Amino acid sequence: MILVVDDDSAIRMSLKLLLGRSGYEVELADGPARAIEIVRSVTPQLVLLDMNFSRDTSGIEGLTLLRQIKVFQPDTPVILMTAWGSIPLAVEGIKAGALDFISKPWDNRNLLCTVSTAIDLHAPSDRQTDVSGFDRSLIVGSSKPLNAVLDTIRRVAPTDASVLIMGENGTGKELIAETLHRNSARSKGPFVKVNLGGISQSLFESEMFGYRRGAFTGATSDRKGRFEIADGGTIFLDEIGDLDIGCQVKLLRVLQEQTFEPLGDSRSRRVDMRVICATNADLPAMVADRTFREDLFYRINLITVTLPPLRERRDDIPLLAKHFAAKASVSSPVEFSAEALGFLTRLPYPGNIRELKNLVERTIIVSGRQRLEASDFESQYTPAMSAATATDSTLDSSERQMIIRALESNGGNLSRTAMQLGISRQALYRRMEKFDIRP
């Protein structure tokens, strides 16, 4: 049963008809008193809760009712309904325990999708058990931390829930995103990968929304944007923490409304896609610093998956090393001595799985041996300059000098510098902090 709480009778009846046609049983409440009466006597599958009642436009009454519902039914998902201009109120509601929010006027398909996802995620555990055929072919390992991540993926993959994947560089965030897609109902649709850290503010709209011929100088033909390409499938937004604050507003609107307008086209395009984001940034800290929008943060992390660094899943290192060796060896299989595997297992791996992969591949090429000993890896590894660190050190030095030269040529103007470098202003801030460059 779905409980709809709204003081507008027309909205109540519209939702009753819409949800009823989709097979849901619906109970209606015109205000807090009736809503509390219902949740004290039965357990709804879901509550659709309006945040603004006629006597209170501040939303305080709606927040109070939300907290009361969570007291009586702490495990029941609550989806808030609010006008677009009241998104900050919806964010407060999510902090108070709501699962998600939709804006009025809503899109019927989007609302039904949100409702279905919420109910599936909170279904009884016997309906969430793993099913045969779960595709984990991209994931190597069987350690306890990794299995905990896979358990979450098994539960979340069949739904349309937005997922935020967090973890250090090199932990395999893209592989987890693709595994989610492969095990979803959208698996036959496109899986579109977008590195937001590599898209400047000036190119964001043309890259993501697409454009029509003549929209700007050089637009000689129509071009689909990433959102349109992802229609019917999944879009993976990597490095979302690097997205400029202005672009965050545009992204939020697309995620909220599921519509966009290509450059040079006045017609809105509707898109049906699942959104998976990833970052190695501390988004909660960025929200506190006001460098990442709070409403966008809550929109993208309905489910958060945090990947463990390789140093916390050392049991997987031998399996990963053999996996990379099998892919790198083109002639005959490569074997590892017990001492070699022991050496690899003890390394710190600041570059995580990517560093291990580079070390194994380079050692196979340089040694030319079919059986690798610990000494083979020792000769290719030094703590201060691992494979990943050596490359990163050279790149970091070059990037630091490039940023300094760009700052000097633009008289220290950060906006012009970011534009010249083709990155967002926020990404420039982060790189300046990383390289200790003072404005």
Image (cartoon, rainbow, N blue to C red):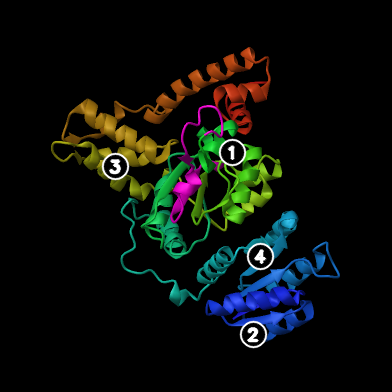
> How many residues crowd mark 4 within 10 Å: few (<14), some (14–19), many (20+)?
many
User: Mark 2 or 1 closer to N-term?
Assistant: 2
Q: Which residues are magenta?
A: 214-240
How many numbered marks are there? 4
Question: What element does badge 4 sit on?
Answer: loop
User: Mark 4 or 1 closer to N-term?
Assistant: 4
Question: What element does badge 3 sit on?
Answer: helix
- Three-letter code, disc 3: Ala
User: Mark 4 or 3 closer to N-term?
Assistant: 4
Find residue 266 and report its image quarter: top right
Question: Which mark, by number, is residue 42?
Answer: 2
The CA distance from mark 2 to mark 1 is 44 Å
Q: Quadrant of the C terminus?
A: top right
- The residue under label 3 is 321
User: Mark 2 or 3 closer to N-term?
Assistant: 2
Q: Quick check: 303 left or right of 360?
A: right
Q: Is residue 225 magenta?
A: yes
User: Mark 4 or 2 closer to N-term?
Assistant: 2
- The residue under label 1 is 243
